[in-house]
Amino acid sequence: MTPSDSELLEAMETEGFVFLPNFLNGEALTELTAHVDRFIRDVVPTLRPEQVFYEDKSNPETLKQIQHMNTHDLWFHDLFTNSRFQELAEVLLKGPVVPKNMQYFNKPPGVGQPTPPHQDGYYFMLNPCEAITMWFALDVVDEENGCVRYVPGSHRHGMREHSRTQTLGFSQGITDYPTDQDRKGEVTCPAQPGDLLVHDALTIHRADANRSCTRSRRALGFIYYSERAREDREAHTRYQRRLAEDLKSQGKI
């Protein structure tokens, strides 16, 4: 049964995330997956290095992350701004939204690294911090290949202190994770292709490495800001510039 808007809002306000199994299926899921394959084949080779991350940039099979798919392809722009995804964002953020970034994520088999515990709002630099991230599974995702793990209710306790990590694509992580409360509360969220997870920008989450030798862990990410939120653009630009410089110096991009 599909939850009502009020049930979704209650879950988001209480837990800080919602799980929507089978959000897309059948032909819609098949079409989306085909367009992801097309984008990787035809569009990725045309993108700037800072928009595409690899675990090993000499090996295309280790593709890890793609930024701003919606700005490089009309099909994904339409999916991002004129679909059930944006409609759901407007429900959960209680009003008009700003579609900010559509991303591709993967943890390639055998080399996919852990995602450090973090809060997306730390990267977003918003006031007020009103935003959500959607995580849409393209593969079977479980504890072996790195399913998402949440700390329910953590969005109600504000922003935790973050510091620099060495994880490509996730440069900031929570410094004191896990506390006893984090450890006791953390839940795993395995998913099937077509399932959707949505979390508040302040909800703490992480994922383990892909320990499988054969299975990928592909997903799409959709980031929406509330129209009420205001971005510190100067601070965000400085952060992105420093990050790109660091990645280049490390030979990552």
Image (spheres, helix red, strand yellow):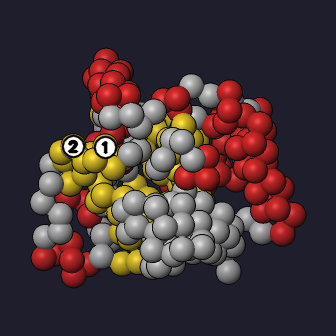
**Residue under the point 13% across and 76% down:** 180
Percent coordinates x, y for residue 99 in the rendering: 57, 36
| Rendered position, 224 above or below 134 | above
Three-letter code, disc 2: Arg
Query: Label 2: few (<14), some or many (≥20) within 10 Å?
Result: few
Quarter holding the C terminus?
A: top left
Q: Report which residue position mark 1 lands on.
A: 171
**Residue under the point 84% across and 69% down:** 26
Q: Quadrant of residue 187?
A: bottom left
**Viewer-proximal residue among 178 and 63:** 63
Percent coordinates x, y for residue 59 in the rendering: 57, 47
| Disc 1 to disc 2: CB gap under 8 Å | yes
Residue extending farthest front: 58
Comes first in the chain, label 1 or label 2: 2
Instruction: Specify the label residue 77 is tagged with.
Output: none
In the displayed structure image, the side of residue 15 where residue 85 appears, left or right: right
**Residue under the point 39% across and 34% down:** 251
Query: Label 1: few (<14), some or many (≥20) within 10 Å?
Result: some
**Residue under the point 17% across and 64% down:** 177
Q: Distance between the residues labelled 1 and 2?
A: 6 Å
Residue extending farthest top: 234
Q: Quadrant of residue 208?
A: bottom left
Q: Report which residue position mark 2 lands on.
A: 164
Percent coordinates x, y for residue 181 in the rendering: 16, 75
In the displayed structure image, the side of residue 58 where residue 160 appears, left or right: left
**Viewer-proximal residue among 168 and 193:** 168
| Rendered position, 94 above or below 111 | above
